Amino acid sequence: MGDWFAANTSEKNSTADAGSPGSAPSTFFQYRSRRSPVVCRKGCVSSSQPLASSIGLDLLRRGANAAETAVAVAAALAVLEPCSTGLGGDMFCLYYDASTKKVQCINGSGKSPMALSLETVKDSQSFASSAH
């Protein structure tokens, strides 16, 4: 890996071979990667499982938003890759709410308190929404 990184970040590769096959112009993509750049104009879903990604893409086509799609892809991955993800895993999310023009953050990491109940969560949600 180190040799590949050195070969692809050297001065000779930064502009001289910008027109060679398989490389992007250096003014457009500064970082060279083994992965192809992707441009999406109407939506994009990426996951480690093509079936989970296709489920998410289908939801976007049907009018779901990014948050709904992410939940569905995570649920699909829990079935398709049970050893990689699922209930009990950590979750971090930054979500832009266009109606409020604010970025929301969800930190779903760490352990849940033993005494946590649905009522406690509902109470904290009503408090949080009234505080804004």
Image (tube, helix red, strand yellow):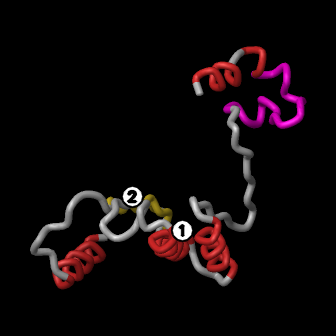
Q: State whether residue 67 appears in this view.
A: no
Residue 18 painted magenta:
yes
> Which residue sits at x=64%, y=66%?
50
Picture quarter containing residue 7? top right
Amino acid on which disc 2 is placed: Phe
Earlier residue among tags 1 and 2: 2
Secondary structure beneath label 2: strand
Q: Residue at the front extreme?
A: 83
Which numbered tag is attached to residue 92? 2
Is there a contact, CB below 8 Å, between mark 1 and mark 2?
no
Residue closer to the observer: 58 or 103: 58
> Which residue sits at x=48%, y=66%?
81
Residue 16 painted magenta:
yes
Q: State whether residue 83 appears in this view.
A: yes
Residue 90 placement (x, y as % from top left): 34, 60
Q: CA distance from mark 1 to mark 2?
A: 19 Å
Q: Which quadrant is home to the C terminus? A: bottom left
121 to 91, vertically: above or below: below
Residue closer to the observer: 76 or 10: 76
Q: Which quadrant is home to the N terminus? A: top right
**Main SS of the magenta segment?**
loop
> Which residue sits at x=34%, y=70%?
87
Q: Which residues are magenta?
A: 14-31
Residue wearing tag 1 = 98
Residue 28 placement (x, y as % from top left): 77, 36
